[in-house]
Image: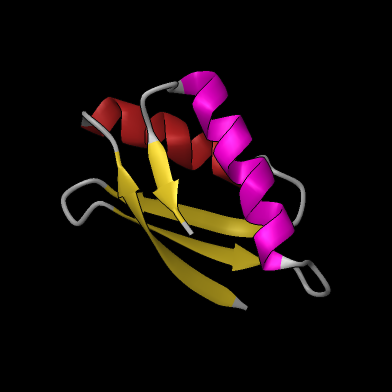
Amino acid sequence: MKKSYKIDVDCANCANKMEEAARKTEGVKNATVNFMLLKMNVEFEDGANPSEVMQNVRTNCRKVEEDCEIYC
């Protein structure tokens, strides 16, 4: 399953950090961040609960960029 989320981030470097953090989150098969569109596309692993996984993605992203926001 793939979903797209609106994000709020200040710079392209921060967006790259968010993308890496999201990819390393359990339950995420792949994640890409488009800084220009302020969007994060997330592909979830089979059987993963997207709302639970996104809570973990948000937590992991804030560890690397505390000012970021993901709107679920």
Q: Residue at x 33, y 27 (%)?
A: 14
How are the residues colored? secondary structure
Q: Residue furthest bottom?
A: 1
Residue lying at 44% horizontally and 21% vertically, measured from the top left: 66
Please indicate whether residue 54 sits to the left or right of residue 8 in the image: right
The structure residue drawn at horizontal position 55% and vertical position 75%, both measured from the top left corner, is 2
Q: Position of residue 51 (x, y in %)?
A: 66, 62
Which residue does the image show at 34% across and 49% down from the upper left?
Answer: 7
* Residue 30, above or below 46: above
Q: Quadrant of residue 30?
A: bottom right
Above or below, 43 against 57 in this view is below
Question: Picture coordinates of residue 34 (x, y %)?
Answer: 28, 52
Q: Quadrant of residue 63?
A: top right
Residue 56 covered by magenta stretch: yes
Residue 11 left/right relative to 39: left
Report the label total.
Answer: 0
User: Which stretch appears magenta?
Assistant: 50-64
Residue 67 magenta: no
4 over 10 or under it: above or below:
below
Q: Residue furthest right?
A: 47
Image-based side of 17 in relation to 47, left or right: left
* Image-based side of 63 in relation to 19, left or right: right
Residue 57 lies, in percent from the top left, at 61, 44
Closer-to-camera residue (36/58):
58
Majority SS type along the magenta span: helix
Q: Nearer the viewer, residue 6 or 12?
A: 6
Residue 1: give x, y in percent of width and height.
Answer: 63, 78
